[in-house]
Image (cartoon, grey):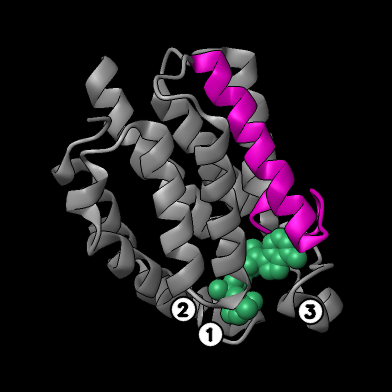
Amino acid sequence: MWLTQSAIETILVSLISEKDTLTQLDVAIGDGDHGANIERGCRAVQSIVTDLVDLDLSDATHKIGYTLLMSMGGASGALFGTFFLTLGRKLSQTPDFSEFCTAFENAIQAVQDRGKSEQGQKTLLDVLIPTSQLLLEQAPPKKWRDISDFAMECANNTKCLEAKVGRASFLGKRSVGHIDPGAYSCALIIHQICDLLEVRYE
Ligand code: ADP
Ligand code: MG
């Protein structure tokens, strides 16, 4: 068992509770469905939680990716799905921290390949890429809270960027001044996982 059922459920419930915020962010620069997409993905994962706790980290992460890919919808469904699928595929059954970092980088690269996108284009990559770099620098972090705060700061910083890919890019310069919804949901996921790790390893 890699995470308890209640730990996974805590993450999912907390993400679902942010649905309205995510909807509002996507109404501002997209089509308003990001909150609903995240909720759909979380509910699908909720329905397999009892299966997940019997799997090792690699298989559980892979299964989460597959479930998101099949359920979430939207550009984010394909991208989150690809991320977790690749992460699961690259992890061994009991990875150490350095192996986790390499798998994390591979998963980010798979998202970039799928989205044909890079850092600086106002997407979830603007949280994932800098956060993975910080993880590598700290290897392993002394305080998971610092990683979590940094990811949130990265999401907030997407306000300054102009969207170059995805629906928000249709707005051009008018996308500046708004937080990217996918960047924010990524930061929320990182925040939740770091909270759990902080408690576990304090
Ligand atoms: P959709 O854009 O299909 O409505 P969502 O609203 O669920 O899907 O997700 C939008 C988020 O997906 C964006 O905020 C952005 O972070 C991310 N995104 C969209 N297109 C790309 C891309 N090509 N590369 C990386 N991330 C992207
Ligand atoms: Mg949308």
Question: Image quarter for residue 179?
Answer: bottom right
**Which amino acid type corresponds to the residue marked 1 in the rendered image?**
Gly
Query: In whole angstroms, how far apart are the C-alphas of marks 2 and 3?
Result: 18 Å
| Mark 1 neighbour class, 10 Å CA radius: few under 14, some 14 to 19, many 20 or more | some
Residue annotated with mark 2: 23
Q: Quadrant of the C terminus?
A: top left
Q: In the structure shown, which secondary structural element does the residue marked by tag 3 occupy?
A: helix
For the residue pair 47 and 38, the one nearer the viewer reads as 47
Q: Earlier in the sequence, mark 2 or mark 3?
A: 2
| Mark 2 neighbour class, 10 Å CA radius: few under 14, some 14 to 19, many 20 or more | many
> Residue 174 — which label?
3
Q: Quadrant of ligand 2?
A: bottom right
Question: Image quarter for residue 71?
Answer: bottom left
What's the magenta region?
97-125
Query: On the picture, is 25 further left or further right than 5?
Result: right
| Mark 3 neighbour class, 10 Å CA radius: few under 14, some 14 to 19, many 20 or more | some
| Front position among marks 2 and 3 | 2
Q: Is residue 191 visible?
A: no
Residue annotated with mark 1: 32
Query: In whole angstroms, how far apart are the C-alphas of marks 1 and 3?
Result: 16 Å
**Which amino acid type corresponds to the residue marked 2 in the rendered image?**
Thr
